Image (cartoon, coloured by chain):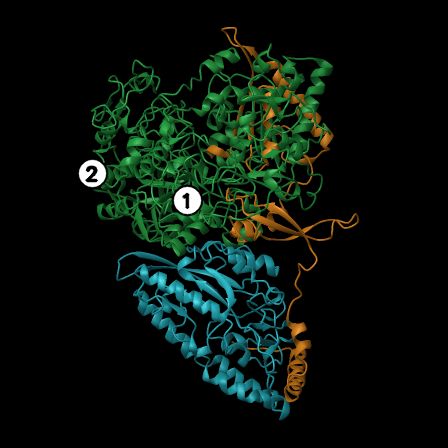
Chain colours: A orange, B green, C cyan
Amino acid sequence: MNMQLSRRQLLKLTGAGAAGSALGAFGFGGAEEAMAQAVRPFKLARATETRNTCPYCSVSCGMILYSLGDRSKNARSEIFHVEGDPDNPVNRGTLCPKGAGVLDFIRAKTRVKHPMYRAPGTAAFKQVSWDWAMDRIATLMKEDRDRNFIAANKDGVTVNRWTTTGFLAGCATSNEAGWLTWKVTRGLGLIQVDNQARI
Amino acid sequence: MTNSWTDIKNADIVLVMGGNAAEAHPCGFKWVAEAKAHNNARLVVVDPRFTRSAAVSDYYCPIRAGTDTAYLLGVINYLLTTGKYHAEYVKHFTNASYIVKDTFAFNPEEGLYSGYNAERRTYDRSSWDYEMGEDGFAVRDLTLEHPRSVFQLLKQHVSRYTPEMVERICGSPKDKFLKVCEYIGSTGNGEKSMTIMYALGWTQHSYGSQTIRTAGMLQLMLGNMGVPGGGVNALRGHSNVQGLTDIGLLSQSTPGYLAMPTDREPTLASHFANRDFRPLQANQISFWQNYNKFYVSLLKAMYGTAATKDNEFGYAWLPKIDKVYDTLQQFELMHQGQMNGYICQGFNPLLSVPNKNKMRAALSKLKFLVSIDPLETETARFWENHGEFNDIDSAKVQTEVFMLPSTCFAEDEGSFTNSSRTLNWRWKAADGPGESRTDTVIMADLFLRIRDLYAKNGGAVPEPIQNLDWNYVQARNPSPDELLRELNGKALADLKDPTDPTKILRRAGEQVDGFAQLRDDGSTMSGCWIYSGAYTEAGNMTARRDNTDPSGLGVHPKWGFAWPANRRVLYNRASSDPNGKPWSARKQYIHWNGSRWVGPDVPDYAPTLSPERAAGPFIMNAEGVSRLFARKLMAEGPFPEHYEPFESPVANVLHPKTPTNPAARVFKGDMEVFGTAKDFPYVATTYRLTEHFHYWTKHVKLNAIVQPEFFVEISPDLAREKGIQNGGWVRVFSNRGSVKAKAVVTKRIPVLKVDGKTVHTVGMPIHFGFIGETKKSFGVNTLTPFVGDANTQTPEYKAFLVDIEPLASGPAVS
Amino acid sequence: MATLQSLDLQRRSATSGTPPAARKTLEVAKLIDVSKCIGCKACQVACMEWNDLREEVGEVTGVYDNPHDLSPATWTLMRFTEWDNPDTGNLEWLIRKDGCMHCSDPGCLKACPAPGAIVQYSNGIVDFVSENCIGCGYCVKGCPFNIPRISKADNKAYKCTLCSDRVAVGQAPACVKACPTQALVFGSKEDMIAHGEERVADLKSRGYDKAGVYDPAGVGGTHVMYVLHHADKPPIYAGLPLAPKISPLVEMWKGLTKNVGLLGIGFAAVFGFMHYVVNGPNRVSDEDEQAAAKLKGDGT
């Protein structure tokens, strides 16, 4: 190893050395100051804690989400740290490498932030409004339903099914969202409905 | 899971097979570590790879991927030949004593049961049933000696699975197999218990359900069902895959595992008539006789006041299914051009459904695709060219694609149901980024827009849409609180106590306490009967956070809410003998105290039903006992049988004429692209790594840092044979596609001798794709076959054939 | 009652004098039970997350170790070794969490010429004070475990702090809290030794006759200890030193430290001496590597 010190570092070394030794000569009089200097401040001191559940596997580890601000009107909550919930009887505060890294999922670069639309034959997404996107999807769905809805099968039995549009439900949505999804998909007559249970 | 995560600590033997709990469920695996440290448990791992579960095991036995059924049938044979099974439990609590119809037969040379139709690849299952007595009940022989008793038939059936045969099929050395048998057999006595922890290693085969059945049978033989530290424990995948399955987001399912109407059931009455849950024994109770109450309550939750007795509670508005539209079926139809629209709500099928090239071709035929997801998925960008990783001409893809930003778990509230069936409420910590919206807001918005279009312009059969109950405080933003109340259910009229009509159990409008209060006359509603009890008049039970464990057995009755009825261990009445006495003091759980069933958990039985009535403990079955013989319930036979994967390196040594599952559904075109061992000599298997979660954490920098790139694992022997360097580039190819990867050469991939032939394994983690923080990759589903389990249609991801060759350099990175 | 958060200084680099002795605080320790470790890397991720570190995304080189080495942004790391046990004929996958051992007699601190750049608290934690660090790298050579790393970005040394910020407020280190299988536990050093002994008894009952606690005397004991199933062969665990000790040259330098300030020794002399220390043969490490090769039996 070829050590090269800059002039600034050299000065610092000798100067600090003298100062440090002087401290030593007088004993550890400055210990508290030195300690305060050494230890990084505890970053969660007044952060807001929210109880949640890990989104990944089905152990459902309890999590505490730490966010900036105290939920007062003018402070926007921003999650900056996640830790296991020690009260949860299953994970008892522990997390696996996925759960321990969930902060970078919440803040991933590839989060979708706006409705995006890709027109037929084009090679890029463009940003659209929610209103436009949802109107367009609703129109496309209704067109497909109206054209392909099967009210009765060939034996004349009322079957009220719609087979030409499908719906894959993810499995990191809540039970409540899942129930609403069931209501809506079955309410529309969809039967091509599945989830991640098989995959 | 029949038991719970925390219950695993009570196990004496932990069998990890068909899964890799240490890697895939580390925080659940903690309870294995706990059992080892504080219950002196032994951990036994049977796996085609020496996994991180194996790294901390007491005993490891290798096995060829896809041969677990044969292995487990071999263990059952060992138990029967050595007598190391729980004889009393088998006699009283299983259907071992039931006599099977004399028309039932199994031909061991053919590998087929009676009733097979080769052309349709299905069975007529009518002979797979019990002999019925004149009293209308099934005939039994409690000596178990009748030649057509389930016990004798089973004995005969498994007798072929000797330790030698297991070695020939599975490649597991006989001495290691017998050592595993010894560990397992040590629990067949009531004093000790074994838990089985499995996951996709068992499900993702063309016969996965039968493998899991074999595990269930094994546990029944040992008396390990319903006891602390026992059970067959499916370690579910996603955080809420249990919940969304409970809620019926599967093609053939409704909330609470009731059935979707079919074309053969034009009326509600005919739907009910097809579900005959009459007890098969005198004195037996059969819980499913309450089916109608749950179904009517569901219809009331769907259609509200529009659901009346006169219109069969809106039964006709529910779509009827003519077949199962599972994911594979959906993509097959899409590939045939028979679908126009597709919505993925937090799902990335381009990478998670087999045969990526077929997936991409299928998606290209859609008119529109909607992705509702917190993250950009490969599916949402299937039309985008990513060089070798996704080689497509965008200009030729006419699909309209929408990418809608949804919030993630931290940004909304609601409940998740974990693998132990426990619902836990979650609270919101922050708003989502940008314009993201919750799934509920998106679904509500979509529905209301469509409903408005029908109201304005009319259209095909608008009644089901118009009559859908939408009585939410904010129509465009139904709150999770309201939705969970709806799932729980409430009284729509005053509910009188059936035993004392002067008493009102619940006033109209009040939440019900549980499914016992549901009615079939339209006076109650409940979105999901098994979630009844989750949100009662006492409040949101899923948000309970009292973690006390009074018994010390890992039962936390006041933490969240476990379905059904807050029960933590299923079938727990079986922890006591027929007289209601615990099988052993060590495994005491639920017992009869002279007037009631008592213990640390909610009894899985009628609480005051005396043992003198001799009703069986498995009240979900009409028999009252558990099934070693599955009657007509499985597609390929009432007993499990060894079949090879559709792509296998060897012949089926038991019945070469029927090598593979005769009842598995294979689509035209997919059969043709199965490869043979001549062209693709190596067994491939896919799996998860502990550092990643599906195709999700590749977006997560912290996880990308600790596992950055796709790789394949091979043994040093195969590396030498092929001239492959550790860390060097290779190409792996099947009859469906090819991927490039770095090689990890490791002794952790065993080389097996299978029926005299050397079998090499190529191991491949999933997780990698062309979007996110990890290095760009192809998607391992480029290689996998498009065939599923005959019962569940879970794709055969765990065993197929590939070839491998070294490469001078990797893919061009765009 | 002693508490975990007493962070009185016990030692300070390149500083003479006696630490205050009136208060005796609780010595803490982290116990790493290799036999319970599933190599999941939760500790690695929790460490990066808590300490706001993000290493570059690397690549696969044929092993599961990612990143491949400790670095200024990687303060702890799982090291994986596939070992054929010659006694049983079984493959064992030995997974060791590597990182600072927080020695009672810290070689880094002794070697450090920058006053106050390395401190030892009376609870046993050895911490780096970046502001005082001059990036000379002597700590790297002074460390018998090869732990500190110098950042190219700011030319300062970095390593595990045992989460001194968490311990200061009565919390366990981030890695320990995350660990799913209790392979990592944290508490008083006394309790950790007792817990380690219980674990050793359990391992012996499972046939690991040579199980033991690794708390090497050559560095005065450590505040990060291991439970090893093969405690007679530490080097099979990715080169864990058999008998680590501080180089005698570093010990000599420690004696000289005081003189730097008081006697005004010229920088050149110091530099010359340290240069020899740094570039001189590091015999402890070589011996360990040879021992490791011998035990692994592959001669590489």
In the image, is residue A182 above or below residue B132? below
Which structural element holds mark 2? helix
Q: Disc 2 marks which amino acid? A: Thr
User: Could you tell me which residue is drawn at 28 percent across and 24 percent down?
Assistant: B98
In the image, is residue C300 above or below residue A194? below
User: Could you tell me which residue is drawn at 63 percent across and 31 percent down?
Assistant: B485
Q: Chain of mark 2?
A: B
Q: Earlier in the sequence, mark 2 or mark 1?
A: 2
Quarter of the image where one finds residue B512: top right
**Marks 2/1 same chain:** yes
Query: What crowding class fits label 2: few (fewer than 14 Cα within 10 Å), some (14-19), or many (20 or more)?
Result: few
Q: Chain of mark 1?
A: B
Q: Which mark is residue C52?
A: none
Choose between B673 and B517: the one closer to the eye.
Answer: B517
Q: Name the spot of residue B524 as percent of width and height, x first.
A: 60, 22
| Residue B472 in sight from this viewpoint | yes
Choose between B240 and C50: the one closer to the eye.
Answer: B240
Instruction: Tell me the residue that label 2 is attached to.
Output: B81
Q: Name the spot of residue A167 as percent of width and height, x first.
A: 56, 27
Choose between C290 and B249: the one closer to the eye.
Answer: B249
Q: Disc 1 marks which amino acid? A: Met
Instruction: Tell me the residue that label 1 is attached to.
Output: B764
Quadrant, the C terminus of chain B? top right
